[in-house]
Amino acid sequence: MSIADLFQFLMYVTLLIATIKPMGWYITRVFSGEEFWLRPKIAKIETTFYKIARIRPDVEQHWITYIACLLIFHAVGFVVLYAILRLQAYLPFNPNHVANLSPDLALNTAISFLTNTNWQNYSGEISLSHLSQMVGLTVQNFFSAASGMVVAIALIRGFSRQEKQTIGNFWVDVTRAILYVLLPLSIILAIFLIWQGVPQNFSGDIAVTTLEQKNQMIPQGPVAAQEAIKIIGTNGGGFFNTNSSHPYENPTPLSNFLQMMMMAIIGAALTNVFGRMIGDQRQGWAIFTAMACLLFIHAGLMYYFEQQPNPILQQMAAENNIILTGINMEGKEVRFGLFNSIFYANLTTATATGAVNAMHSSFMPLSGGIMLWNMMLGGILIGGAGSGLYGMLLFVILTAFIAGLMVGRTPEYKGNKLQIREIKMTVLATLVIPFLILSFTALTLYRPDITQNMANPSAHGFSELLYFYTSTATGNGSAFAGFNANTPFFNITGAVVMLLGRLLVMIPVLAIAGSLAAKRLSPITVGSLPTHNFTFIILLIGVIFVFSLLLPALALGPIAEHFLLISATPP
């Protein structure tokens, strides 16, 4: 690793860790209803909304009611967004006169942004109107990120309460997540991006003459606003088809670095929120340590793999008496360099963001395998906005359960006895993702009309298909992009996988929260399992490794392609 790359990596780690405690303090006060500096400035907006919506902020909800509100919230969001996408040709703010999306593509897009996946089977700059981008996608970016955050907060309340039948008020939690966390951060980032050169206007495409005397249309629109929440909410859906490799979405190395920071800032802070709300910040630091260890190990492995030249190119060069040395720059963003392409790719797949500043399909096969594993983990490495923490806490519950069985004690975590109800819900939530990935990949492979028309056959083609269902099931949204997914089959199956992958994890998590909140906490004694030390962290990482790595599937894709590549046989 070069000195410049090492310096940037260390600066990133230092700044991220430095934000954890202040952001954790702030978010804790937001959801605890305590006073802080921003509340008096926004409180009137909050209370006005409650009055209009007839919400009683002082009344909390049972976990079943909380789930019902979550489902209603998603259902209304889907109907509104689907209608906008199907009617955008007749609605205002459509300067380029784009047509309505087809029914299957509108379905896929609405479910995608509803579930915080932001998988895009279209080119945003030519397929969507400004109204669809602003009122449809950008608004839903806030809603989907907020819903993930509040589920994490509800689960934290489950750990911190005893003998309570409620886990909070969904409508209050969502309102506060948007007003006090997502909106202020997005405004700050949007202003910064505008300063860096990201457009924020309502213009149509601008016709220009290039230096080659060719005519070219330059897309315009409200880019900065969508770009900000896309990153902060770990949404990932870009205004442009090429996402964060487009100069209008990611114009400078400084904007690239800040985007990488903002991908992780809420997910990292929520570990501290967890520690604060359960009364032991050491627990939050232990969880963050496990996340960070895996994240940075994966980044190091990817950096090593991409330092190796492509064996097939080496063979072709040798046949022509050319000496080929150096790194694999295929598909990388040359404006930012190798490190920034690799680290961005690692972060975006680890945090369930899905934004891209490089072509993931062009990475070396084992790097692609790392990105697939990041997503198979469910975005828990630092994590998405909320989804990363509640996904990680599921593994914490499994680890505490296994550790309790190993020493012959009733499994517990911070005084919460882990009984059959919690373990059933945990197993259900952790098995949903691999079931969706493997079953839908297998289903598609039985369709000869699809497999015969894939642009890349053999191992890489399998990797592309596996990546598609892994990305949609885990709410990531990035792609290998080696086949045309904008077909009725992929639009519909992708929508089903995205919806099930989101709700069939959220619902068990909220059931666990309700079950834990109703329990009486057991006193912590010298015989209790320490869950903040190095031993527990190592055990947690081991459990994550065992339960998340779909090694047989990876063996058929990235690993097989790696061996084909080193044998200099085109895959």
Image (cartoon, rainbow, N blue to C red):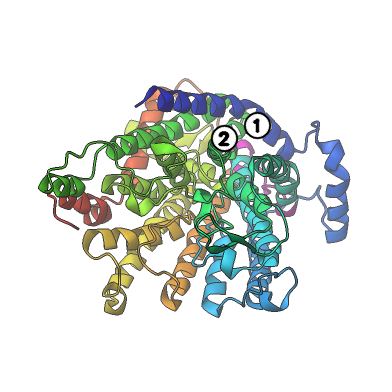
Secondary structure beneath disc 2? helix
Q: Which mark is residue 23?
A: 1
Q: Which mark is residue 527?
A: none
Q: Is residue 403 visible?
A: no
Q: Nearer the viewer, residue 294 or 118?
A: 118
Q: Does residue 87 appear to the left or right of 558 in the view shown?
A: right
241 relative to 420, above or below: below
What amino acid type is highlighted by mark number 2? Leu
Q: Quadrant of the C terminus?
A: bottom left
* Quadrant position of residue 254: top right
Q: Nearer the viewer, residue 62 or 134?
A: 134
- Give residue 361's position: percent from left, percent from top: 35, 54
What amino acid type is highlighted by mark number 1? Met
Q: Does residue 215 appear to the left or right of 31 in the view shown?
A: left
Secondary structure beneath disc 1? helix
- Give residue 337's position: percent from left, percent from top: 42, 37
Instruction: Work out how far the residue at label 1 is from the one at label 2, CA to CA, in angstroms.
Output: 22 Å
Magenta range is: 158-171
Q: Residues within 10 Å of mark 1 (few under 14, many from 20)?
A: some
Q: Give the residue displayed 39% in from the left and 69% down from the top.
A: 484
Q: Is residue 109 visible?
A: yes
Q: Nearer the viewer, mark 1 or mark 2?
A: 2
Q: Does residue 333 appear to the left or right of 567 in the view shown?
A: right
163 relative to 501, above or below: above
Q: Quadrant of the N terminus?
A: top left
Q: Nearer the viewer, residue 495 or 199?
A: 199
